[in-house]
Image: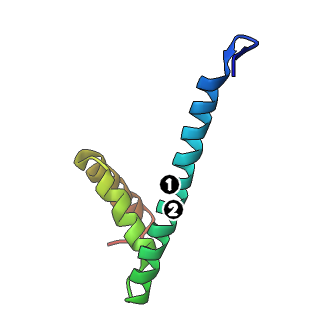
């Protein structure tokens, strides 16, 4: 393919195909993750809590501590915690 309207068609096609392959890989990984959560749930684990723990582990320690502090503060203000 040649340039069409100033666009390098082969280069564009290459980018599109790369993104499509990555989308397929992402879908496969998502299915694998769902299987792991299903297995964990089958073994009695709470997957909602697991997702929260995973989110917390991704956070920087300072950010996590600040968020936990604010959550505790809000819970105390609402009488949810003594």
Decide: few, some or many residues near mark 1? Use Cα within 10 Å; few <14, some 14-19, many ≥20.
Answer: few
Q: Residue at x 76, y 12 (%)?
A: 5
Tell me if I can see residue 80 in this picture: no
Q: Residue at x 41, y 82 (%)?
A: 39
Farthest residue in the bottom direction?
43
Nearer to me, 71 or 76: 71
Q: Residue at x 27, y 46 (%)?
A: 60
Q: Which quadrant, please, contains the N terminus? A: top right
Q: What residue is pinned by disc 1?
A: 25
Q: Is residue 31 visible?
A: yes
| Label 2: element kind | helix
Residue at mark 2: 28
- Do tag 2 and tag 1 residues touch (Cβ < 8 Å)? yes
- Which part of the image, by quadrant, shows the C terminus? bottom left
| Residue 44 located left or right of residue 26 | left
Q: Secondary structure at mark 1?
A: helix
Q: Which mark is residue 61?
A: none
Question: In the displayed structure, does residue 54 sit left or right of residue 19?
Answer: left
Q: Nearer the viewer, residue 34 or 51?
A: 34
């Amino acid at each position: 393919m040649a340039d069409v309207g100033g666009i390098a068609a082969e280069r564009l096609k290459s980018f599109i195909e790369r993104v499509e392959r990555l989308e397929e890989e992402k879908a496969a990984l998502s299915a694998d993750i769902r299987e792991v959560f299903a297995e964990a749930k089958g073994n009695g684990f709470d997957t909602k809590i697991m997702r929260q723990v995973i989110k917390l582990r991704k956070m920087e320690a300072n950010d996590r501590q600040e968020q936990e502090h604010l959550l505790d503060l809000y819970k105390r203000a609402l009488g949810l915690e003594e």
